[in-house]
Amino acid sequence: MIPDFYGSWRQKRDQELVLAEQKALRLQKREMIDDIIRYVGVPLLVAAVLAAPTICRVVFG
């Protein structure tokens, strides 16, 4: 027979592992979003800044 303290310890440990896994998944998603912003957003921003004078000339004559 398994003592009660072991069962409650095991349940608490399983819960801690699940929470740690969820935290790791959130961190991984956050890092993926940061990578997307870095590799797509920054070049897009640079392109917009470089194209702005030409667009202004075309639009405002």
Image (cartoon, rainbow, N blue to C red):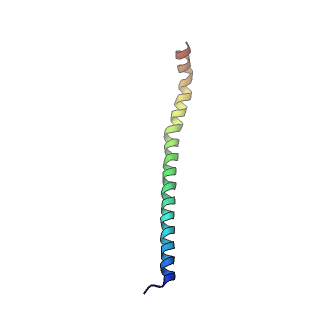
Residue sitting at the far left: 1
Residue sitting at the far top: 61
The mark total stands at: 0
Q: Is residue 58 above or below residue 27?
A: above
**Which quadrant holds the N terminus?**
bottom left
Q: Is residue 50 above or below residue 30?
A: above
> Which residue is rendered at x = 49% and y = 81% of the image?
6
> Which residue is rendered at x = 49% and y = 68% of the image?
15
Estimate the x, y position of residue 16 in percent, counting from the top left.
Answer: 51, 68
Residue 52 vs residue 14, the one in the foreground: 14
**Which quadrant holds the C terminus?**
top right
Estimate the x, y position of residue 60 in percent, counting from the top left.
Answer: 56, 14
Residue sitting at the far bottom: 1
Estimate the x, y position of residue 29 in percent, counting from the top left.
Answer: 48, 51
Estimate the x, y position of residue 41 in percent, counting from the top left.
Answer: 51, 38
> Which residue is rendered at x = 48% and y = 85% of the image?
3
Q: Is residue 3 left or right of residue 49?
A: left
Q: Is residue 59 above or below residue 4?
A: above
> Which residue is rendered at x = 49% and y = 82% of the image?
4
